[in-house]
Amino acid sequence: MKICGVELKGNDAIVCIMSRENGLYDIPSIRVQKIAIADTGGAEQVRAFQFTFAKLMEDYKVDKVVIRGRALKGKFSGGPVGFKLEAAIQLIQDLPVEIISGSAVKKSLAKSQVDIDFRDTGLKQYQESAFETVFSYFEQSAYKPNSI
């Protein structure tokens, strides 16, 4: 199964695609590591973002998207653009999307018996949160049979 982890930051959707087969993880090289939206006020820009994201998922045959959730209010709450991008991703036809809280990601990483050094992944530093999101999703599902 191939899953895309997403971190929404500012006007960007930072992505990391990962698959796991027979207990082995694979992180393929992809053409873009983040998808940005320029003008968040126009519906055309949101449609363009959604199309670009959907095309990337289709091209790499992604089965599911996992978005790292953000707080709705408070000091570390997500901005309005992030929630707009989240909705655009969730509304893509035939693409299952799940949101995982930051605390669930941290808990899963702490519980994981697989130790992956992020520096060895070949990913860019800004992709670390997206990587942790998708990796923790796989690790959570390892404890729940038939969950993926």
Image (tube, rainbow, N blue to C red):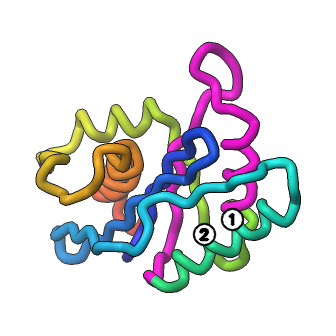
Report the front residue among 96 and 56.
Answer: 56
Question: Mark 1: which secondary structure?
Answer: helix
What residue range appears in magenta?
Answer: 60-89
Question: Mark 2: which secondary structure?
Answer: helix
Residue pushed farthest front?
Answer: 38
Q: Is residue 100 above or below residue 4?
A: above
Residue visible at 31% across and 53% down?
Answer: 135
Instruction: Please provide percent x and percent y for residue 43.
Output: 87, 60
Amino acid type of the residue that numbered disc 2 sits on in the rendered structure: Phe
Residue visible at 78% across and 49% down?
Answer: 40
Q: Is residue 90 left or right of residue 146?
A: right
Q: Which mark is residue 49?
A: 1
Mark 2 highlights which residue? 53
Q: Quadrant of the N terminus?
A: bottom left
The answer to whether one can see residue 143 in this image is no
Mark 1 in CB contact with mark 2 (< 8 angstroms): yes
Q: Is residue 23 above or below residue 37?
A: below
Residue visible at 57% across and 50% down?
Answer: 12
